[in-house]
Image (cartoon, rainbow, N blue to C red):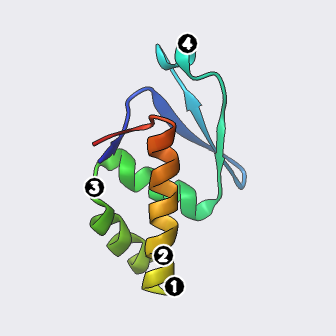
Amino acid sequence: MKIKSGFVLKTIGDNHVVVPVGAQTVDFRSMITLNGSGAFMWEKLAEGCTEEQLLQAVLAEYEADAALVQQDIAAFVKQLRDNDLVEE
């Protein structure tokens, strides 16, 4: 799975914002704000990875319960899919 091209993550201070660029600005006219862990997951997905690889990356970066992280990843990925932001 990979973030579709045409979306860029910008970090301004402590704020993480995803903005459309190029042709995506025609169809997607808003911004997405992410917290630190959301930005971390976005960057990993921009590189292309499976949900399992994403889980392992998050667990390596953050001290958290694996079951809870897996639920959070599933919810995050669902939102990305619902908004047509990822390629399978």
Comparing 74 with 1, the one in front is 74
Q: Which of marks 3 and 4 precedes in the sequence?
A: 4
Q: Which residue bears the numbered disc 3?
A: 49
How packed is label 4: few (under 14 Cα within 10 Å), some, or many (20 or more)?
A: few
Q: Which residue bears the numbered disc 1?
A: 64
Q: Secondary structure at mark 2?
A: helix
* C-alpha distance separating marks 4 and 3: 27 Å
Say above or below: 2 vs 26.
Answer: below
Q: Which of marks 2 and 1 precedes in the sequence?
A: 1
Q: Which of marks 2 and 4 precedes in the sequence?
A: 4
Q: Which of marks 1 and 3 precedes in the sequence?
A: 3
Q: Which residue bears the numbered disc 4?
A: 26
* C-alpha distance separating marks 2 and 3: 16 Å
Q: Position of residue 62 (x, y in %)?
A: 50, 79
How packed is label 3: few (under 14 Cα within 10 Å), some, or many (20 or more)?
A: some
- Residue shown at 45% from the left, 83% from the top: 67
